[in-house]
């Protein structure tokens, strides 16, 4: 499916400001390494020597940003297209699609970390649900060898269009689904090379690493070692030698599920805030990702590819330890089979809003069954209203933030919903669709680049949950704790909030097109990753929306070094009960970077009163 090609002048300006030599010569190879959920300040030469080496010898992006909502698919969409979420429409990991997705389990609120679900959503949204081209597809169209390996969902999203039953027309994709019906089929060439290298034609499962536990059983105590060793072996023993033999440039994406999976499921801290996600299982997850990177760099050396290969490392988001505590939530006063007394159940937002708005609650993950008595929705999601097939309000549950949709765009219901949310101690900051008008205590979606040319429905209200720093004995962003709407337990891990703990992702780069030993003080984000990757590869995408990132020119030899400024934005008026959403912003030219947001005192890293000031640059 072809979309009309529209090049916006804003995008061209951004592209032309930086470094240009990659366009004049044959582009270098590019490896994008994504350690899922890696917090910026967890990396030391002891915890993760390979990543520390890239950061310390290459570029150290000290002022990095994951985009809010700080979830995997959302940030993967930004990295892979260079666009903010208002354009890509990937507002979270679970979104409302306004149609029933069969592969997602017959629900209108699919969890999209799944190749079959992505294929289904693409089909529904005219062949490309992101509504923007990805860097990997552009590279493939231009004749690069391309591959993406790793975590199910975000890996495939790097080159998700075109039908996967034509493997020759698709990037090589290895993920959890490889070898199953929903995986992207492997070409005969790749299959033969796997067999020659003594590697299986199907990916191993996560094994014990996938065990989340429950309220009485701790989760996993092991990292995702075996599965990721397979992906690393495929990359180093099969794909890199194959790409070298083709004697043309390549782009390879490696999406390491660790440390995300190990931090989510950690069994180190059941129902306790400490050590939370700083226990040995999380640290083993970080080391596992680091081992994969070390193996890839060693293979590049042995194949003689290092001098001609750039490596960009960027986590999709940071991470926080889960809290299930609230003094105000009616849902926490009920008792549930699977939830400790006084803790918030999964789906607390849906339960509390159904009560406050006096609307019936139905479960879109259970054939729209009514949720009554001492029960919670199975996946936390809820549809509210008299007729579950024509709901007044939909809640897509995600973790450190949730999405609320108002299918009828009812402004009165929006006002009532906002008022109810303002009463809850677990809420910290509300962002409301500009089309619904301005509401006291909130900020508009456009203020955080969530209003653009999205093909998927734009949420009416994005609800950020409370966060704070525990006494974990490390930097505050390493000690982030957040209220999270999730099946996971207090003491396990989650992300998705506007805590600086979640927005502060690890980022570093090394290679012939990057400065060496350079500390970048300027703000950068995952949208900039996509723009910079495209620039290094000499690619220009069609642009439907104009919410694009910036080429990180200051990190490139002879690139310009722009100025950055800090600002604080607030709701125009406070809510009736005195709350206001505050947003800490950094600015480089027209680019906006979001550090933290929420109600003062309820978000880690939020500075309610910091004045306008220059942060870095000349
Ligand atoms: Zn995660």
Image (cartoon, rainbow, N blue to C red):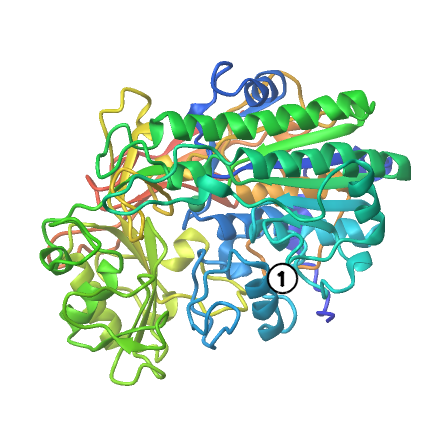
Residue position for label 1? 182
Residue 164 seen in the figure: yes
10 w.r.t. 558: above or below: below
- Mark 1 Cβ inside 8 Å of ligand 1: no
Q: Position of residue 478 (x, y in %)?
A: 35, 28
Q: Is residue 541 left or right of residue 509?
A: right
Q: Nearer the viewer, residue 62 or 215?
A: 215
Dot 1 falls on a residue whose secondary structure is loop
601 w.r.t. 430: above or below: above
Q: Is residue 188 left or right of residue 66?
A: right
The quadrant the N terminus occupies is: bottom right
The quadrant the C terminus occupies is: top right
Q: Nearer the viewer, residue 46 or 433?
A: 46
Q: Position of residue 126 (x, y in %)?
A: 63, 73
Q: Position of residue 204 (x, y in %)?
A: 60, 44
Q: Give the residue drawn at x 54%, y 60%.
A: 87
Q: Give the residue drawn at x 58%, y 49%.
A: 176
């Amino acid at each position: 499916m072809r979309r009309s090609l529209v090049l916006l002048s804003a995008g061209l300006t951004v592209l032309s400001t930086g470094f240009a030599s990659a366009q004049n010569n044959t582009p270098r190879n590019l490896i994008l390494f994504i350690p899922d959920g890696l917090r910026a300040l967890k990396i030391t030469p002891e915890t993760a020597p390979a990543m520390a080496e890239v950061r310390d010898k290459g570029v150290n992006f000290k002022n990095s940003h994951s985009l809010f909502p700080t979830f995997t698919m959302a940030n993967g969409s930004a990295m892979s297209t260079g666009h903010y979420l208002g354009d890509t429409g990937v507002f979270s990991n679970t979104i409302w699609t306004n149609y029933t997705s069969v592969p997602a389990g017959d629900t209108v609120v699919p969890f999209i970390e799944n190749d079959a679900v992505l294929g289904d959503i693409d089909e529904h949204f005219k062949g490309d649900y992101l509504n923007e081209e990805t860097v990997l597809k552009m590279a493939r169209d231009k004749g690069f060898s391309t591959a993406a390996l790793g975590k199910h969902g975000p890996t495939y999203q790097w080159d998700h269009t075109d039908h996967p039953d034509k493997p020759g027309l698709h990037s090589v994709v290895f993920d959890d689904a490889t070898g199953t019906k929903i995986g992207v089929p492997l070409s005969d060439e790749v299959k033969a090379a796997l067999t020659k290298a003594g590697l299986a034609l199907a990916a191993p499962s996560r094994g014990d690493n996938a065990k989340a536990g429950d309220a009485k059983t701790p989760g996993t105590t092991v990292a995702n070692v075996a599965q990721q060793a397979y992906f690393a072996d495929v990359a180093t023993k099969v794909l890199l030698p194959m790409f070298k033999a083709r004697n043309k440039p390549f782009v390879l994406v490696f999406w390491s599920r660790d440390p995300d999976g190990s931090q989510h499921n950690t069994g180190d801290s059941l129902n306790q805030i400490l050590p939370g996600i700083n226990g040995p299982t999380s640290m083993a997850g970080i080391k596992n990702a680091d081992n994969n990177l070390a193996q890839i760099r060693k293979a590049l050396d042995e194949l003689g590819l290092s001098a001609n290969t750039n490596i960009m490392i960027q986590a999709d988001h940071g991470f926080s330890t889960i809290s299930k505590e609230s003094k105000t939530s009616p849902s926490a006063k009920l008792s549930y089979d699977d939830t400790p007394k006084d803790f918030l159940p999964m789906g607390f937002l849906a339960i509390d809003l159904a009560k406050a708005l006096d609307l019936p609650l139905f479960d879109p993950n259970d054939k729209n069954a009514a949720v009554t008595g001492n029960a919670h929705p199975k996946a936390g999601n809820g549809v509210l209203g008299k007729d579950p097939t024509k709901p007044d309000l939909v809640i897509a549950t995600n973790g450190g933030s949730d999405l609320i949709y108002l299918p009828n765009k009812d402004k009165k219901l929006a006002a009532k919903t906002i008022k109810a949310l303002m009463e809850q101690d677990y809420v910290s900051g509300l962002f409301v669709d500009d089309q619904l008008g301005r509401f006291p205590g909130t900020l508009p979606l456009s203020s955080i680049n969530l209003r653009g040319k999205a093909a998927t429905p734009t949420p009416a209200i994005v609800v950020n949950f409370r966060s704070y720093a525990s006494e974990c004995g490390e930097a505050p962003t390493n000690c982030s704790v957040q209220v999270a709407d999730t099946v996971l337990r207090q003491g396990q891990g989650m992300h998705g909030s506007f805590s600086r703990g979640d927005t502060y992702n690890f980022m570093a780069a090394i290679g012939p097109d990057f400065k060496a030993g350079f500390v970048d003080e300027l703000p950068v984000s995952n949208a900039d990753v996509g723009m910079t990757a495209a620039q290094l590869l000499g690619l220009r995408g069609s642009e439907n929306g104009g919410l694009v990132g910036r080429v990180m020119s200051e990190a490139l030899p002879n690139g310009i070094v722009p100025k950055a400024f800090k600002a604080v934005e607030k709701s125009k008026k406070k809510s009736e009960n005195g709350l206001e959403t505050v947003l800490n912003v950094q600015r480089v030219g027209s680019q906006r970077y979001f550090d933290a947001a929420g109600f003062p005192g309820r978000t880690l890293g939020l500075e309610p009163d910091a004045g306008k000031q220059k942060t870095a640059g000349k």
